[in-house]
Each structure stands twice: as C-alpha cells, then as structure tokens.
Amino acid sequence: MKSYYNPEDLKKFGAIGEYQKPMADKFFAYYAEVFKEGALTAREKSLIALGVAHALQCPYCIDAYTTDTLEKGCDEEQMMEAVHVAAAIRAGASLVHSTQMMNKIKEISM
C-alpha cells in the first residue's frame, strides 16, 4: 500500500540543510543542546519526546523515539504510559475548549 510516509525518509533527516545549511545547522545545534543531560535525564527527555511524537502524530518521530527510548532502557509499559499521558493532555486540551462553545451558547441564548 502506498503512503505519504516512507520510513526510509527518516534516514534523510540530516539532509534538511541541503537547501538552507545555516538554518539547519542552527536547528541541529539547538536540538543537540535540548537533548543533553540537564535537569532531566536523556531517558526522561526521550519519553517526553515519544509522548509528543504521538500527540503530533509524526510517524518519523514515533519511529525514532520508540528506538531511542528502548536504547535508553525504557520498557514497553513506560513507553505506553508516556503515550497515555500525551493522549490525556491532548484530550483535555480539546475538552477545555468546550468552555468557549458553552460561553457562546449562553451568549446566544440570552
């Protein structure tokens, strides 16, 4: 089955500088800095990235951070819990906007 998503394209990520090297260099420097050990461990950052990848529904990021979290010693239960945290936040973000709808209904009904 054909798809817009080609897993092989993930290997080409480093080539994003082909048409704009200065911007890509800055992005990769920032990215490397973000994922360094700091207040959070590299393992914790990888789990966060895995959850965000699912919230954003980026298949490339899901593949990359599934591999990365496994390499950093995470197990399947921890990984799935991170995905559920992301899903709960995403659902909550949708639901909290229902207050706008309720406000509008009350405004129209008055």
Image: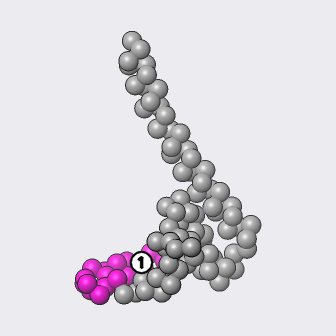
The way the protein has been coloured in the rendering is: one colour
**Would you say 104 lies left or right of 10 here?**
left
Give amino acid for label 1.
Tyr
Tell me where residue 29 appears, x and y as whole percent.
36, 82
Residue at 56% across, 63% down: 54
Q: Residue at x 50, y 67 (%)?
A: 58
- Given residues 91 and 3, the one toward you in this image is 3
Q: In this view, does 1 lie to the left or right of 34?
A: right
Residue 59 at x, y percent in the picture:
53, 70
On-image quarter of the N terminus: bottom right
- Residue 96, compared with residue 16, is above or below; it is above
**Magenta stretch, overall SS:** helix
Q: In this view, does 51 lie to the left or right of 25?
A: right
- What percent of the width, then of the height, locates residue 45? 55, 71
Q: Mark 1 points at which residue?
A: 31
Residue 45 in sight: no
Residue 23: say if magenta: yes
Q: Give neighbour class at mark 1: few <14, some 14-19, many 20+ (Cα, 10 Å).
A: few
Q: Start and end of the magenta stretch?
A: 16-42
* Identity of the residue drawn at 63% across and 61% down: 83
* Residue 38 in the image, given as x and y percentages of width and height: 51, 75
- Residue at the (50%, 84%) spot, across then down: 8
Under circle 1, the secondary element is: helix
Give residue 18's quadrant in the image.
bottom left
Vertical order, 5 against 80 (above or below): below
